[in-house]
Amino acid sequence: MSNRREFLRNALIGGAGIGAASLISSISTPGNALLFSPTLDETAWTEAGAILRRIKAPVFPSRDFAITKFGAVGNGRADCTEAFAKAINACTRAGGGRVVVPEGTFLTGAIHLKSNVNLHVSKNALLKFDRDPKKYLPVVFTRWEGMELMNYSPFIYAFSQRNVAITGEGVIDGQADCDHWWPWKGRAGCGWRKGEPEQTKARKLLYEMVEKGTPVKQRIFGEGSYLRPMFIQPYRCENVLIEGVTLRHSPMWQLHPVLCRNVTVQRVHIEREAGATEQTGPNADGCDPESCRDVLIKDCTFATGDDCIAIKAGRNNDGRRVAVPSENIVIQNCRMRDGHGGITIGSEISGGVRNVFAEGCQLDSANLNIAIRFKNNALRGGQLENFYFRNIEVGQVSDATVTVDFNYEEGENGPHIPRLRHLIIENLRSAKSKYALDLQGLSKAHVTDVQLSNCTFEDVAQGSVVKYVDGLSLRNVRVNGKVITNMG
């Protein structure tokens, strides 16, 4: 891709500058020429096809291990934690197969998957996770907001395994609410009151440990720290499949593969409970692949209390220490209903993100803030490059259709320069938004090579904001019915 990128950059530098008063309301100098490019990077999607050919879902032997045969009782009250562990051990000893959750309601603590195990949640099965935090001890090696530590086990966890899956048409319920897990965020309006325990002290300590380079084995949290566990987290796994299930009431991030390779997430439904407000489900991102390679997210529905899809790669010094980017990610035919950002890059991206393709997605809700979102700052840093979006339908969003925000949280207050280059958006239609574009780099960190082609933005309330962007190319772009014309 580097040769194409250099070719494109040279072409843009030599191009003629154009502008559009109806599109741009705030332009910072230097380096904000609006350029017209008649040809986008048409060969990139061939590379997306190559990524898809590499991604293969794991296949499991035709052996079933029903948890009821290992002592599980589906009455919603009996503790089935031991039955799950026995069934998983028996399955992996036999060479693999399905651990089946049949019809009924099954209550459990942490589930740890092993190689060659497909946890199959059958239709009309409800898998509920115990609200007692002690059920997620002892602590395990995990990532929390992009930082490595020893913390509560994710509800469903796999560490350094191959060929693992969660499938079926059943429901997986974390049972988090304003009385359990969510108050640990320390935010008023959802069960927490001033003076009650919450995460601030432990979060600050973890930040300090990361900055000092404290060995991970010494970053011991868990009980008394109030750092919420993730819902589903395969960590350092290869060949991962999550398919068909419905997720609800997550304590924090929901699908969080970390340092994984060959990941497929398809036909997953993430529900936001009826009548929910932004005060519920804090940080309940939908799917957050972090430092992963070769990932497919397809035919999923997201209604979350935070970003729907958020691609990540570690925070600050930990992201730079581990130094593994997220790369080669394809998103197809997903629907984003509620959340902060629909398709988001960041903000924990110090390890970098590259080669992301999204197509055929629908994003539409008054409760969805931004359709396509990049968030970074000078404390995170990270190289972000090669993003391709096409055939995107946006019904309405409450803020901007496309946002690049290098002022996120700490903003320019940091020594690390965030970089974003080569963002291509084709055939996007937006029916309603506050802004069409809100693209803001930093004076010391310009965004480069942003191209829009055949895009339509209707019912846009305010002019777009473009600051510190080098090479914004517009081709057949309409805002409120007006083609953006050459003003040079």
Image (cartoon, rainbow, N blue to C red):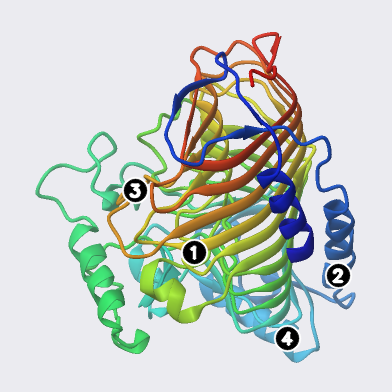
CB under 8 Å between discs 1 and 3: no
Report the side of 455 relative to 52 (left or right).
Answer: left
- The kind of secondary structure element at disc 3 is helix
Mark pair 1, 4: CA separation: 39 Å
Residue at 48% x, 49% y is 446
Residue at 9% x, 49% y is 195
Mark pair 1, 3: CA separation: 30 Å
Residue at 72% x, 32% y is 36
Mark pair 1, 2: CA separation: 26 Å
Mark pair 4, 2: CA separation: 25 Å
> Pointer 1: what residue?
382
Crowding at dot 2, Cα within 10 Å, few <14 / some 14-19 / many 20+, comes out as few
- The kind of secondary structure element at disc 4 is helix
| 298 w.r.t. 73: above or below | above
| Sequence-first tag of 1 and 4 | 4
| 297 w.r.t. 464: above or below | below
Q: What residue type is labelled 3?
A: Trp
**Quadrant location, the N terminus:** bottom right
> Pointer 4: what residue?
92
Q: What residue type is labelled 2?
A: Arg
| Sequence-first tag of 2 and 3 | 2
Crowding at dot 3, Cα within 10 Å, few <14 / some 14-19 / many 20+, comes out as many
| Sequence-first tag of 1 and 2 | 2
Q: What residue type is labelled 1?
A: Gly
Of badges 1 and 4, the one in the foreground is: 1
> Pointer 2: what residue?
54
| Sequence-first tag of 1 and 3 | 3
> Pointer 3: what residue?
182
Residue at 49% x, 80% y is 322
Q: Residue 182: give x, y in percent of width and height.
A: 34, 48
